[in-house]
Image (cartoon, rainbow, N blue to C red):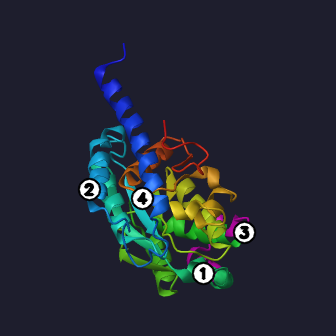
Amino acid sequence: MINFRYHVVSLAAVFLALAVGVALGVAFVDSDDNGAGGGGDSRADTAEQAFETAFADASAGIVGQGLADRRVVVVTTPGARTSEVEDLTARISDAGGSVVGEVALTTKLLDSANRQFAESIAQQSAGDVPGVQSGEDSYTRIGAALARALMGDPELDEQASTIRSAFEQGGLIDLPSAPTERADLALVVIGPSSADSARGEILAAVTSQLATSGAGGAVVGPSTTSVDGGVLDQVRSSDGAGSFSTVDVTDLAAGRLISVLALVKSSGGQNGSWGTTRSADGQLPQ
């Protein structure tokens, strides 16, 4: 028999989908396309924002404790909004997950002009890691080195520390909150700012290595990132995109809840593309 809780959760999912659809209409009218440096939602109606946040909080039951006993590393790219990262981090904790730290990928790492330098750092610090030697392309090998440093068993062993230190000293990553353990899930948060045409493919290659070296992962960002040629649009069309989930509505409180739900689904082997109508699998995971 289908119980009452099932009905409540199902209705919450329906109303959340409706709320996302309505809020997206507002977001497209009033979208903030600069966003770099930690800005927040640009919509003037703070009462509307408060309603949206309260609705997302009330709908948190669709995520429940889906990240219980999961260790999550939050990875950001240049321009990721601080307010979104903080809310995502809080929602991971609400879902039972433990955020082990935050790692920022720098422009230097994501600029294809620095490919050889980044690959040399990976090879020097992680030369005996299988994926660094056998990767199909440079950024697969670079991602494999980062994955060895950030993903896997909790112990932050000497090799993991060495790789992380080499990437940091080389200016390829920053450590806003240095991970205290290695993670089994990776949440990659991108900002709304424009980027060179190669950045999405680079990010997809790195994220794929993080996700497959652990138990899953997701790349999430605001709606502007999934327009034709945007970073998330590039990520979704890149090789390896099927190994992690994507969400393109982090500029909405409901979207950030969906981002955490996408991470839960990825940890269970269900990856997909969710958010706006540009997302192949609909508004939210089922």
Residue type beneath disc 3 = Asp
- For label 1, count other residues whose C-alpha is less than 10 Å away and answer few (under 14), some (14-19) or many (20+): few
Mark in the foreground, 3 or 2: 2
Figure quadrant of residue 158: bottom left
Sooner in the amino-acid sequence: mark 2 or mark 1: 2
Image coords of residue 175 (percent x, y) = 39, 77
Q: Secondary structure at mark 3?
A: loop
Determine whether, in the image, residue 262 is placed left or right of residue 140: left
Asked if the residues shown at circle 1 and circle 3 are in contact, with their CB atoms under 8 angstroms apart, the answer is: no
Q: Which residue is mark 3?
A: 137
Q: Which residue is mark 2?
A: 50
- For label 4, count other residues whose C-alpha is less than 10 Å away and answer few (under 14), some (14-19) or many (20+): many
Q: Which residue is mark 4?
A: 183
| In magenta stretch: residue 263 | no
Q: Which residue is pictured at 55% across the width and 42% down the height?
A: 282
Q: How many marks?
A: 4
Query: Which mark, by number, is residue 124?
Result: 1
- As measured in the structure, the alpha-carbon distance from the residue carrying label 1 to the one carrying label 4 is 23 Å
Sooner in the amino-acid sequence: mark 1 or mark 3: 1
Mark in the foreground, 1 or 3: 3
Sooner in the amino-acid sequence: mark 1 or mark 4: 1
Q: Secondary structure at mark 2?
A: helix
Q: Is residue 129 visible?
A: no
Q: Which residues are magenta?
A: 119-137
